Image (cartoon, rainbow, N blue to C red):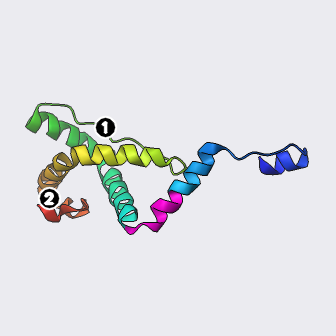
Amino acid sequence: MRVVADLLEVPHMRCIGHTLQNGVKDIFDKVEAVRNAVKSAKAILTWVSTSRVWNAYLAWVRRHHQREAKVLPSIFPTRWWTELKLFEQIVESYDLIREFAASFERGKHLRKVPGNNRC
C-alpha cells in the first residue's frame, strides 16, 4: 500500500492498529516471560485442537464435569489481542486440560501440557 501511495504521490499515514500491533509484538518478543507464555499457550492449543483430542476432551468434560468445555479461540499472528483471548481461555480451562491430559491415553500426552510440574 505504501508503494502504491508513493507511486500515486498520495500522502501516506500509517494505520494506528498496525502501529500498535508492531509495538505490542516488540514487547512480546523481548520479554522472556511473555515469550514463554505465548509458546506454552500455542503448544496447548496445538495439542488440544487436533480433532481426535478435541473430541475426546469435549466428551471427557461432559462425562466428568457435566458441562460443556469452552472453545479455545484461534490466534492470528498479526492480531496480538487474539493471543490475549487465548491466554484467558487457557487460564480458565488449565486445570480441566491438565486433568484430561493425565487421563487421556493413560497420560502419555501429559508431558505436552506446559507448566505441568504442578501435578
The residue tagged with tag 1: helix, strand or loop? loop
* Other-residue count near label 1 (Cα within 10 Å), few / some / many at <14 / 14–19 / ≥20: few
**Labels 1, 2: front one:** 1
Residue that numbered label 1 is attached to: 71
Report the front residue among 24 and 4.
Answer: 24
Asked if the residue under mark 2 is in contact with the one under mark 1, i.e. CB atoms within 8 Å, the reply is: no
Is 17 in the magenta?
Answer: no
User: Mark 2 falls on what kind of element?
Assistant: helix
Residue type indicated by callout 1: Val
Q: In the image, what residue type sits under mark 2?
A: Gly
Residue 40 place in picture, x, y as percent: 32, 60
For marks 1 and 2, the one nearer the N-term is 1
Q: Residue 20 at what x, y percent from top left? A: 57, 49
Relative side of 68 to 66, left or right: right
Q: Position of residue 91 (x, y in %)?
A: 25, 48
Q: Residue placed at 62% from the left, 48% from the top?
A: 18
Residue at 31% in and 45% down: 88
Callout 2: few (<14), some (14-19), or many (20+) C-alpha neighbours within 10 Å?
some
Q: Which residue is mark 2?
A: 107
Camera-side residue: 9 or 102? Answer: 9
| One can see residue 74 in this view | yes
Q: With 44 as the anchor, is 20 left or right in this view?
A: right
